[in-house]
Image (cartoon, grey):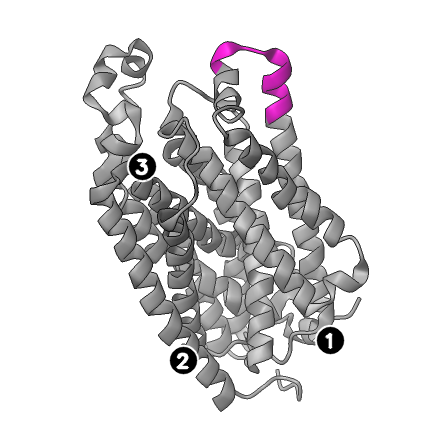
Amino acid sequence: MNDPRVSPATSTAASEHLARAQRVALPLALACLAILAAGAVASPARALTNLLVGAVLVLGLAVGGIVLLSLLAVANAGWAVVLKRILEGLGSFVPVGGVLLLATTPGLRVLYAWARPEAARDALLVGKAAFLNPTFFVVRMVGILCVWMLFGLRLRRLSLAQDAGGAGDAAALATRRTVRWAAGFLVVFAVTACLGAFDWIMTLEAHWFSTIFGFYNVAGILVSTVTAVAIAAILLRRAGALPELRDDHLHDLGKLMFAFATFWAYQWVSQFLLIWYSNIPEETAYFEARWRDGWMVVFFANLIVNWALPFLLLLPRAVKRNERALLAIGALLLLGRWLDLWLMTMPANFPERPVPGLFELAGLVGPLSLLVFWLARTFARVPLLARHDPYLGESLHHHI
């Protein structure tokens, strides 16, 4: 594909922007992670919970990149090919996000009641011990991470093979294999993402359960990932690294942000209403803990930040095509995803809501800064356009 609008390589100015992002993001990430490491000694429950929140946040963005890449592949969605390298960059972060998540496992007894010695006196936890025990918990975590890494690496290699194959049979074969692997990953993801949400978050309160909880978190992954892609695409275009990005691409990303935020709200309402009107004590305990001792403000702020405000702000067509507006709304939605995870995890060990402080800031900024460093490093090393994707021409000429 030789299109005059395809930039031949990352410009010098764009390279400088990416290098600057790396120089700023890495020290910031290390400083925040050092704060959490020190907190693991001074205030282990709070520091480890915030590390868990940050790890799940960025790991969700990473695996979400693979999910969106797979959805676009099986749907033959040509409009988004200019975003393909961003999705692959996010997917390549799964091993790093996995390390952050594994860093919480030495503190299992701090985070999870079922991992503590006194769990032996709890009949319900004893009944779940065959599943909820530290060894099997870590094995499941490693297994899920390995599966995600396998599919992400395979799809990445097929994408590079597609480019290396030019317009010949090798590229066509790589394209067909990409669709098959992508379809397989979507099935695997539906199972592993739900299992991960049950394990890493829901078992913080092991007496409680919700069958919707897994898909509720899948919705959060989808909206936050689309948001991260929109932010990355805009910043890359401003840096001169992705001049092929059009306002029409932003419009589609804005529509996806709007749609997935509403899907998240649907899952939120479904879970809440089903538990509210059935009024079964072992189910309502979860929401009762989030309605008292200062948590109610966070509970309703969660709904406002993750749905009400984005829904109203993204309604106008002009907003979805405006860089500054999408960046602001995107920052709000990423903050909302963190708030949602914080609300899901913190009340398990802190019935009285703590005032957000240094550990919360480190738990949010540290993992996100590490992700920024990784993406800037990745984008500086590979072309930002999949030059031999069969749908590249459609993406370059995309208009609404």
Distance from the alpha carbon under mark 1 to that under mark 2: 30 Å
- The image position of residue 204, as x and y in percent, is 37, 29
Q: Is 106 on the left or on the right of 308, as rendered?
A: left
Point out the tag, 1 or 2, that comes first from the N-terminus: 2
Q: Is residue 278 magenta?
A: yes
Distance from the alpha carbon under mark 2 to that under mark 3: 37 Å
**Residue at label 2?**
19
- The image position of residue 155, as x and y in percent, is 46, 60
**Residue at label 1?**
397
Residue located at (65% from left, 37% from top): 265
Secondary element at image label 3: helix
Residue located at (29% from left, 62% from top): 30
Residue located at (47% from left, 25% from top): 293
- Above or below for 204 versus 373: above
Point out the tag, 1 or 3, that comes first from the N-terminus: 3
**Residue at label 3?**
140
- The image position of residue 298, as x and y in percent, is 54, 36
